[in-house]
Amino acid sequence: MRRIYVIFSIYIKGWIRDKPAFFFSFIFPLLLLLIFASVFGGERVQTITIFVQNQDIVANEETDLSKIYVNVLNSTFKVEKIPNNVSALDYVKTKSGGLATFKIRILIIPKGFKENATFLAFKENIKLQILNLQYLLQSNFINETEKQQIIQGLEALQILYSSLPNKTLNVKLITEAKDQDYFIIYSILSQINNAFLNRLIGINATMSINTELTTEKRITSVDYYLAGLLTAFVMTNGLFGTAPALASIRKFGVLKRFLATPLQKHEWFLGLVFSVMFINTLLLIEMLLVAVIVFKATVNYNIYWFILFYIGMFMFIGLGVFIGSIVKSVETATVLVNMIGISMMFLSGAFWPLEIMPDYLQYVAKALPLYYFHTALRSLAVFGELSLVMNSFLIVIILSLLFTAVGVKFLKWKEP
């Protein structure tokens, strides 16, 4: 244990004395958080997106009338469909992916939509026939016998009409209580509903909108950038804190001297790992304090958040050890970690939402380890529900185990 502490203290002292390393791993992330959270704290102007869940299913198929209604919606909004077998609210919260300006706007087409629409059309047609017969009775071109027959038919239709239940056709709109565009969306939906009924069904009935306001916790700009910047610099600390250091001691013959001492490979490795973990812990404390004090953020992270944070470290520590074990020079190690680190920083969505990136780059982002690290960490911080990020959580665990195992395997206690 004492030898592990010695290795740990050597790397920590070297980090403190190395002013550029201290700045970029401790001060620079703080400056970026202050800049990004302050400058991009306002909401962006974006196309109105509405999530639609069609629950009007018959024989595992959406009814034709409900499909037509969705197509009408799609002509005005950007419609994203929600599978009918999941919780609409949980699906949209997961779909948000940590986007600070994401809006919860869900339209539920209830079961029985086609049945109710068809019934209303039938009832309105009966009402129309009643009006036609009442108008026909005023005509001078029918005789008394014909009038009596019309009266009998009219009475039968009136009895039928009065016996029909009062069904309503409605959809359910779920929005946030503080959504400033609520009235605009409601007004547009009302116009769409009226046009749908009048033109496609041919009736003058109305379709109501049952509004449900949700007070789900919002992902603020601080939430977004805190997770993104924190994970990005955990990545750089893991890569830069291991790969160049390992390449350096291999290049300058330090390992040869280690072989003549009681120091074991695992002791050196643990000392290096603990030094990186210590630096990242200081970074975490610093960033959380600034988020709370400067931006009044509410920090209520659960145990899963901290477990994920420290597991994610090993993903990049292991990758850094692997790089430092296979290259033959410090320069090569530095180039490689720069290429990997910078690429993941700017392509993973850590610094800005994927939604503003081209589609092909979004696919690239979702192939990067950092994407799953920062999205899972962000969603856990805001929503606190492990079930919403289980896939990303498991991916981070698997990649951390894989990279750590590969790094240890390739770590040779010998000269290059």
Image (tube, rainbow, N blue to C red):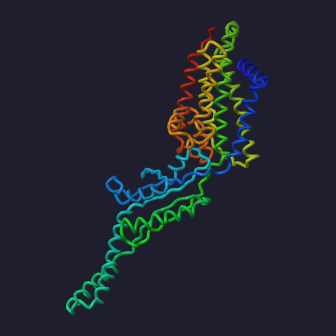
Camera-side residue: 335 or 270?
Answer: 335
- Dividing the picture into quarters, in which one does residue 244 lie? top right
Q: Position of residue 154 (x, y in %)?
A: 28, 84
Residue drawn at the location 31% of the way across and 77% of the way down: 126
Q: Position of residue 231 (x, y in %)?
A: 64, 35
Residue drawn at the location 55% of the way across and 32% of the way down: 368
Q: Quadrant of the N terminus?
A: top right
Is residue 141 depicted above or below 127 in this figure?
below
Camera-side residue: 278 or 334?
Answer: 334
Q: Residue furthest left?
A: 145
Q: How many marks?
A: 0
Q: Is residue 143 left or right of residue 360?
A: left
Q: Is residue 125 left or right of residue 110?
A: left
| Whether residue 132 can be seen here | yes
Is residue 262 depicted above or below 166 in this figure?
above
Is residue 302 depicted above or below 105 in this figure?
above
| Whether residue 285 can be seen here | no
- Dividing the picture into quarters, in which one does residue 148 lie? bottom left
Q: Position of residue 355 (x, y in %)?
A: 55, 43
Camera-side residue: 194 or 233?
Answer: 194
Q: Quadrant of the C terminus?
A: top right
Q: Position of residue 304 (x, y in %)?
A: 60, 40
Is residue 66 depicted above or below 336 in this figure?
below
Camera-side residue: 131 or 210?
Answer: 131
Q: Residue furthest front?
A: 141
